[in-house]
Image: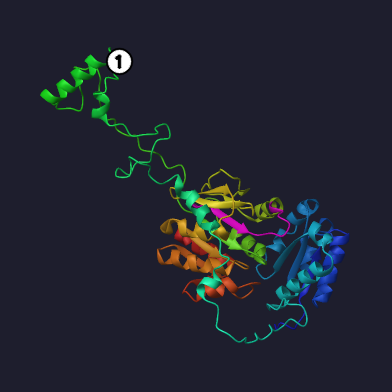
């Protein structure tokens, strides 16, 4: 099918402003609306009989039960599903509404031209006389804030005075290093402590015991066997990055992963409006694994899917992935910190191209790094860049199978 042919679209939304806005956007994009109805008032047979190529859904809590009756059709791999927030759709006006309509048209027709009319080509840069700017001039306004923040983050991990040659981190309740010989000769011992310590020193000097014990002093020094620490979490994780056009790809990926999948799956998908709770509910309907909203301070446990809100960053502590408040530079730092043998990175529709380089570096260390196939992908820029590094591209269902084969 060529990009110029109209797509058959089923519009599922309750009556109101949001439905009117979406209907207008579909007409402007040249789509053929084969069904327009409240999802609470139709069944899967009615939706299937309309033979849509695309289903556009205005999400809101009131239609959740209705959508559950339509899952047989919505899970069809030949049907693309586009979600939009009903509240946001109803509020869009003017430029914002036109911008969303252009993105919708690009997705329906399989192209990437989302510029307004008259902006198809960038103006040719004009040459100016004079020497080009020097590196010092280019960086004149560059701040050092990022470097200071990075230094602050690792300051607590650096050794303090007195421990630099032992590899030990300074304990917070000691402000200085005490020389044992100087302390013993300073006369600061209590009267009742001196005989015991003297006896201890005498016994050590005269007859080193066969075992690490000192009986004469009344003190016992024993080597205790350390109990093995049980690993409560499996190191590593599967991190999925997506953006515009990504919810449908994520939905198809999660539908194929088994409930007992041995890695946590983290979904980092930026949403306009930030209604991540709605995204959790929608993904939970198709996923076999539990789908949770990530919370700061918690760790990612194996067998769970976590939707990561924009205000949370991902962090790696002793090989295990967790969540904290703050911005993690879009995910680049997290990718570099993942344990390669136990982790995977998937770049789906709309993922940031800036993630490609750190993902490729992680792949070179043994991690599973793949992207969404360009066929049917709304925004494949990251996938194409990833393929240039030799990474494999596949449909979301196939990506899930690759994860299962890996673990």
Q: Give the camera-side residue of 283 and 28.
A: 28
With respect to residue 123, does 80 lie above or below?
A: above
| Residue 401 appears anywhere in the view | yes
Q: How is the image coloured?
A: rainbow
Residue 117, image x and y in percent? 78, 81
> Quick check: is 272 in the magenta stretch?
yes
Which region of the structure is painted magenta?
261-276
Image side of residue 361 versus residue 73, left or right = left
Q: Residue at x 29, y 18 (%)?
A: 189
With respect to residue 385, does 185 lie above or below?
A: above
Q: Which residue is mark 1?
A: 190
Quadrant that contains the N terminus = bottom right
Residue 90, image x and y in percent? 84, 60
Residue 267, image x and y in percent? 59, 57
Image side of residue 228 versus residue 75, left or right = left
With respect to residue 179, does 92 lie above or below?
A: below
């Amino acid at each position: 099918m060529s990009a110029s042919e109209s797509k058959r679209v089923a519009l599922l939304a309750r009556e109101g402003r949001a439905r009117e806005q979406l209907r207008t956007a579909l007409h402007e994009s040249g789509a053929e609306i084969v069904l327009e109805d409240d999802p609470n008032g139709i069944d899967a047979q009615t939706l299937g009989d309309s033979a849509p190529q695309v289903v556009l859904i205005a999400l809101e809590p009131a239609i959740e039960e209705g959508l559950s009756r339509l899952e047989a059709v919505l899970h069809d791999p030949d049907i693309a599903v586009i979600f939009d927030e009903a509240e946001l759709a109803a509020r869009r006006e003017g430029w914002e509404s036109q911008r969303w309509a252009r993105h919708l048209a690009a997705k329906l027709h399989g192209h990437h031209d989302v510029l307004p009319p008259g902006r198809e080509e960038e103006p040719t840069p004009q040459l100016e006389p004079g020497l080009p700017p020097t590196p010092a001039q280019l960086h004149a306004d560059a701040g050092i804030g990022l470097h200071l923040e990075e230094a602050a983050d690792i300051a607590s991990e650096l050794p303090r005075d007195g421990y630099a040659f032992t590899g030990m981190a300074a304990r917070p309740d000691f402000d200085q290093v005490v020389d044992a010989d100087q302390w013993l000769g300073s006369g600061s011992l209590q009267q009742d402590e001196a005989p015991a310590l003297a006896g201890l020193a005498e016994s050590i000097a005269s007859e080193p015991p066969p075992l690490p014990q000192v009986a004469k002093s009344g003190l016992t020094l024993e080597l205790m066997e350390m109990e093995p620490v049980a690993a409560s979490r499996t190191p590593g994780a599967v991190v999925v990055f997506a953006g515009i056009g990504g919810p449908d790809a994520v939905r198809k990926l999660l539908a194929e992963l088994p409930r007992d999948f041995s890695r946590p799956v983290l979904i980092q998908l930026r949403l306009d409006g930030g209604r991540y709770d709605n995204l959790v509910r929608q993904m939970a309907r198709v996923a076999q694994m539990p789908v949770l909203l990530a919370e700061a301070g918690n760790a990612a446990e194996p067998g769970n899917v976590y939707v990561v809100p924009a205000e949370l960053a991902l962090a790696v502590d002793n090989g295990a992935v967790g969540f904290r408040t703050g911005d993690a530079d879009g995910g680049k730092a997290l990718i570099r910190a993942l344990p390669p043998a136990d982790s995977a990175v998937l770049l789906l529709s709309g993922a940031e191209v800036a993630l490609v380089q750190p993902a490729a570096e992680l792949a070179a260390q043994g991690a599973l790094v793949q992207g969404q196939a360009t066929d049917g992908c709304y925004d494949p820029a990251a996938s194409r860049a990833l393929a240039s590094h030799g990474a494999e591209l596949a449909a979301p269902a196939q990506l899930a199978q690759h994860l299962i084969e890996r673990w």
